[in-house]
Amino acid sequence: MTFRSDMNERVRKARDLIGVMYNYAGMYSGVRESGKMHCAEFTAAVYDGKVPANVYRQLEMLTTHPGKGQPGDIIVYGVSPEWGLPHVGILTEKGTVVHASAEYGQVVETNGSDMPDLFIGYVHPNIED
């Protein structure tokens, strides 16, 4: 599989998860709830478990790449004043972001500029396929 097709597959997987309910319990405690996910569990699912389902552990293994983000990249936002945690999602070919949103209570696709003050950058996990 080429890099581009692999990343397009990541976007497809992300969109397939739209509507999955948000895991409020797991956001702070790490407790998994069947059929629900928080943002790091979501990106871990999109990357087939090749990144951990913990936002801080994901950030430790991510390598920032230069330039504009590419579809399928993980987009990283800084610590939200409301939630006290960083936030991650998947960038699409439209510049939108698919993410597990506590605000919406589920996985959604939203405008990529929803949290411009918290934007950190685009990253591609440093993983071996």
Image (tube, rainbow, N blue to C red):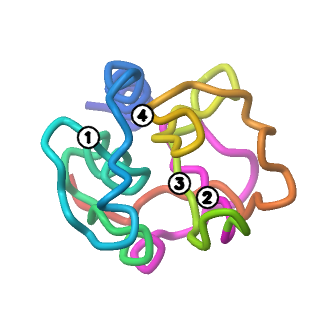
Asked whether 22 falls inside the magenta stretch, the response is no
The secondary element bearing badge 3 is classed as: strand
Please identify, in this view, whether the residue under mark 2 or under mark 1 is nearer the observer. 1
Observer-nearest of 45 and 123: 45
Name the residue located 52 percent from the left edge and 32 percent from the top edge: 98
Q: Are marks 2 and 3 in contact (CB under 8 Å)?
A: yes
Residue interval drawn in magenta: 59-79
- Residue at the farthest left position: 34
- Report which residue position mark 3 lands on: 88
The secondary element bearing badge 4 is classed as: helix
* Mark toward the start of the polypeptide (3 vs 4): 4
* Mark toward the start of the polypeptide (3 vs 1): 1
Please state if 99 lies on the left or on the right of 14 as rendered. right
> How far, Cα to Cα, is label 3 from label 4?
16 Å
Could you tell me the amino acid type at mark 3?
Val
Please state if 5 lies on the left or on the right of 72 as rendered. left
Asked whether 73 falls inside the magenta stretch, the response is yes
Q: Are marks 3 and 4 in contact (CB under 8 Å)?
A: no
Could you tell me the amino acid type at mark 1?
Lys
- Report which residue position mark 4 lands on: 7
- Report which residue position mark 2 lands on: 76
Please state if 84 lies on the left or on the right of 32 as rendered. right
Q: How far across and how far down the image is residue 59, in percent?
A: 47, 73
> How far, Cα to Cα, is label 1 from label 4?
24 Å
Observer-nearest of 125 and 115: 115
The secondary element bearing badge 2 is classed as: strand
* Mark toward the start of the polypeptide (2 vs 3): 2
